[in-house]
Amino acid sequence: DGGITQSPKYLFRKEGQNVTLSCEQNLNHDAMYWYRQDPGQGLRLIYYSQIVNDFQKGDIAEGYSVSREKKESFPLTVTSAQKNPTAFYLCASRAPGGNGYTFGSGTRLTVV
Amino acid sequence: AQSVTQLGSHVSVSEGALVLLRCNYSSSVPPYLFWYVQYPNQGLQLLLKYTSAATLVKGINGFEAEFKKSETSFHLTKPSAHMSDAAEYFCAVSDAGGTSYGKLTFGQGTILTVHP
């Protein structure tokens, strides 16, 4: 079955380290998105990509970076510049036509 | 610009009672509207969506929502709550690939508790 795979499910990072979250989809979707979820704040957009080799900053991009070298993959790097990285991160993709979104199961990142 | 406001961060109902979760939106173009459910440490599952067809939208698990343009609302209802409905619910708006590039904008979420 088609879907989005996020890995790992749980991730621990020491302060000052960069860490990369994986997002892979086999839905043949062009558009992909990264969201951050914090309690009581809903989901906030970090980065999005409409097509391979192109991506744009979302509402809270500071301290994060992404790449889109392949259609299937949209990894997110949480850099040491991100002041408060502990959160739940969700990846999503959008079907052509605009109204079909698929979400991964998320990665919970904890800074220790 | 688009935005979503969910009224009430926590809603508590008894099993068998009506569930009503409120959502108001703002959008400069005709919106697509969504309700998602999330269980702890999981991704989002789509309950239903409005994409400019019928204003009363029926979704999974007995949920439905009505799009009211005059009130800019898209409230979620279910006639009779089950214990399994306890979760967090998110309302979201999208411009479906317009100037916002199909980005979903979410409300803050409503945690639904169901009492026996």
Image: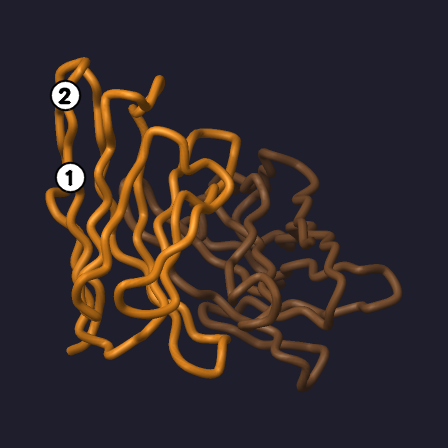
Q: Which chain is orange?
A: A
Q: Which residue is mark 2?
A: A17
Separation of residues labelled 1 and 2 (CA atoms): 10 Å
A58 relative to B26 in the view: left or right: left
Mark 1, secondary structure of its residue: strand
- Residue occupying image coordinates x 58% and y 54%: B91
Type of amino acid under label 2: Gln
Image location of residue B110, percent across then percent down: 56, 41
Mark 2, secondary structure of its residue: loop
Query: How many residues crowd mark 2 within 10 Å: few (<14), some (14–19), many (20+)?
Result: few
- Residue occupying image coordinates x 60% and y 71%: B98
Q: Which residue is mark 1?
A: A20
Image location of residue B108, percent across then percent down: 57, 39
Image location of residue A24, percent across then percent down: 17, 61
Residue A59 against residue A51 in the figure, above or below:
above
Outermost residue to the bottom: B53
**Which chain does the residue under circle 1 lie in?**
A
- Residue occupying image coordinates x 33% and y 70%: A51
Specify how the rendered protein is coloured.
by chain
Q: Quadrant of residue A25?
A: bottom left
Image location of residue A20, percent across then percent down: 15, 39
Which quadrant of the figure contains the C terminus of chain A? top left
The color chain B is rendered in: brown
Outermost residue to the front: A53
Nearer-the-camera pick, B75 or A90: A90
Type of amino acid under label 1: Thr
**Marks 1 & 2, CB-CB < 8 Å contact:** no
A1 relative to B34 in the view: left or right: left
Query: How many residues crowd mark 1 within 10 Å: few (<14), some (14–19), many (20+)?
Result: some
Which quadrant of the figure contains the N terminus of chain A? bottom left
- Residue occupying image coordinates x 55% and y 64%: B34
